[in-house]
Every structure is written in C-alpha cells, then in structure tokens.
Amino acid sequence: MFGWEFPPINSGGLGTACYGLTKALNQENVDITFVVPQGEQSNSSSHLNLLALNKIENDSTDKFMKIKKIASILKPYISSQDYKRIKRKGDYFSALYGNNLHEEVQRYAEITKKIAKQSDCDIIHAHDWLTFPAAIKAKEETNKPLVAHIHATEFDRTADNPDQIIYDIEKEGMMRADKIIAVSNFTKQKIIDNYEIPADKIAVVHNAVEHKSRIHNIHKKSHEKIVLFLGRLTVQKGADYFLYAAEKVLKINPDVLFVITGSGDMESQIIEKAAELNIANKVVFTGFLTGKDVDKMYNLADLYVMPSISEPFGITPLESLSNGTPVLISKQSGVSEVLRHVLKVDFWDTNQMANKILAVLQYPELYHNLKINGKKEAMRFNWQIPAQKCVDIYKDLIELHKIKED
C-alpha cells in the first residue's frame, strides 16, 4: 500500500484515514506493507510494516516494522511551488532531488521499484496522486491489480484551478488502475466529470472514525461561547467564509469566540482577513494541533463548523460528534451524504451560516438535540465497514486476475 502520510507524520485527514483503514484491514486478516515518501524511525505501528523513504539512506528494523530511509523531500499536500521553495533551501542531499515536483515524484517511483521486486503482494493499493507513479511501477514489476483510492482530487484542493502536472498524474493513475475507490458519491461524480472515467470502474467507500476514549468535562474559564474551525488553512477548506460568517454573528452576539485550529499556505491571509473585518480580538489562532489537543478543542467548542468549498469526505465532523460537539457542515462535502443529525449549509451562503451558528448558540434545545443524536449517529461509523468493502474489492480483483492468467 502506497500513501503520502501516516501518523505520527500527519498533516491532514489522509493520514487519519490510512491509519483507521489499515488497522481495520489488519483485523480482517489482511497483511499490509505501507510505503510513504518520508518518515521518522519512531513511526512504529503494530498492525503493519511501515517502509519510510526518508532523508538519510539507511535500513533499520524493529519488532513492528522495517524502515528503508531514502532521500526524498516529498511532503503531504505539496504543490509545485512548495517543492521549488523546499528545493531552494537545499541540504546535503539536495543534488539527489528532482529539479521539479514531477521529476521528484518520478524519482520516488523508480526507487519503489526495488520494494515491488522484493514484495509478494496480491494487491497494490495507492492513496492519491503523489503515489500513483510509484504504484504504476509496482504494477508493472509485479503484474498485480492496482486499486487507486481517491481521497481528494486536484479540483478539490485548488478550487477548480488544477495544476496540469498533478492533474495528468491523477488521470494516468486512474486510467491505469484496475479499480478506483472514491470516498463519497460527491467525489465519484467529480472523477467522472473531470477525468472521463466510466462510472462502473468506481466504487464508493465512505470513510469512518476511530472510536477511542475521549476527553470530557473540560471547563471553560470564560462565559463566551466557542465556535471552532479545524482544518488546513488552504483555499479548499473555506476558512475565509468562516470569518465572513463570524463577522455577521458578532454583530448580533458579541459574546462568541471563534477559534481557528490548523496551518497552511493561507494562514497569514486568514489572520489579515480577521483584522480587515475588525474581529481580530474575537478570533484565536492555535496553530496545528495533534492527538489529545485536538480532542480538547472539540470539547471546548460549543459548535464545530466545516465550511469547505469542496470536501471529498470530511472525517473531522465525525471526530467532533464523537466528542459530543454539534456540527455545521457545508453541503459541498461527502460526509453530508451520510449524516442526518447535523446542520448543513452552502459554503458560500455566509448569511445562512451565521444564522445557524446563532441558532445553536442561542437555543439550548437545538444544541442538546444535535449533541446527543449526533454522537449516537457518529458511533455507527467504524472502520470495519469500509475495510470489509475494500476486502470484497480485493477478492474480486484477485479472482479476475487469476482468470486472466489462466
């Protein structure tokens, strides 16, 4: 299995999804070797072998995994501009890296051919575009079926302004795949419309949430209500629309604090936007948080808002509901297909977004209804369901592959 992030090296929902899915697949007796472009030696996980391609050439093994460290500066959610900036910084191994993002992705793919030659796999499963060239090389080396798992497209990440190089890589990966998994019907339709992939090649497998012990009964020091945004600060996630709605809310109810948790290429722009709207004293930026700190933020919040412009699925609403925090999500999201006990709004309709935020904060009955029923609904989502669907896809592909070989 190829991915571009895995906890604890984790920048967004893809790493969370990969962890939950692989753990559930392991419980279905699926043995997994997970390959990532980079990682630290502390990246141990008891349910799979993790092969991390890192900055220093070195092999190591421990009780739970094998790590192969190979020079690479590929990072989660990297763009061509990000790659150029990282490349310019340079280090001891900079001469090894590709001159641009496309070259580095292809170089990474060539390196992974060695892993493919040594593997005894039945299925190649690749998550999102950065790993597709590597997965195609692995398919050529092993002659095994390829599953392309689409958690987001370039159209989602860029608000319909795709990088041509990334788009071309995505399309080739989907064309070469034997089966495509989309995380929602919303994503499936984007694949059909933008990549000319036939509908019968695409299976929809919704994401889930890991149910674990949560932090509860955190007491706020202030009487202010807290509304939370948690996500990458990129054009895709709609943090600017969150601020537009915040401005409208504060004109009616000034006793509200808006918390923005996350980081990204729009961080300085979002900070400046809060100042421009004259609400900077009512907006708190926490930066990027992980682990229990994320659960603490959900627990402190009276409402979690996901105003994404284009969200293929969206695991964070499930996390919020699991923590007992009501949710307001954009209709432009995959998770809106499967959740009933949440509020929904078009991302661009900041008047309605503000009205619904105010309603949750002002009407205790609505708040408690969303809190109680939302949490019950979230408990129905567990990773065994998508894992079982993946296993069924694997079995069908393996059977078809045997028939072709015969």
Image: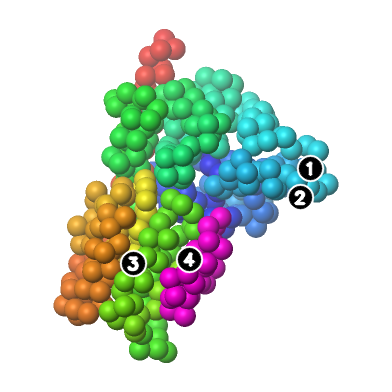
- Amino acid at the residue labelled 3: Ala
Q: For the residues carrying marks 2 and 3, which lies nearer the camera in this image?
A: 3
Relative to 94, is 20 on the left or the right? left
Mark 1 → mark 4, Cα distance in angstroms: 36 Å
Q: Which mark is residue 374?
A: none
- Amino acid at the residue labelled 4: Lys
Relative to 24, is 100 on the left or the right? right
Mark 1 → mark 2, Cα distance in angstroms: 9 Å
Mark 2 residue element: helix
Q: Nearer the viewer, residue 222 or 217?
A: 222
- Amino acid at the residue labelled 1: Ser
Residue 34 appears in view: no
Q: For the residues carrying marks 2 and 4, which lies nearer the camera in this image?
A: 4
Q: Which residue is mark 1?
A: 94
Label 4 neighbourhood size at 10 Å, few (<14), some (14-19), many (20+)? some
Q: Which residue is mark 4?
A: 273
Relative to 108, is 344 on the left or the right? left
Specify which label sits upstream in the sequence, 1 or 3.
1
Mark 4 → mark 3, Cα distance in angstroms: 12 Å
Mark 3 residue element: helix
Q: Which residue is mark 2?
A: 89
Q: Which mark is residue 245?
A: 3
Q: For the residues carrying marks 1 and 3, which lies nearer the camera in this image?
A: 3
Q: Say if 2 sits above or below 310 in the image.
A: above
The reply to whether callout 1 and callout 2 are in contact (CB within 8 Å) is yes
Q: Nearer the viewer, residue 288 or 296?
A: 288
Residue at the (60%, 29%) spot, across then down:
116
Q: Which residues are magenta?
A: 263-288
Residue at the (31%, 55%) spot, across then down:
348
- Amino acid at the residue labelled 2: Lys
Give coordinates of residue 326: x percent, y percent: 28, 69
Mark 4 residue element: helix
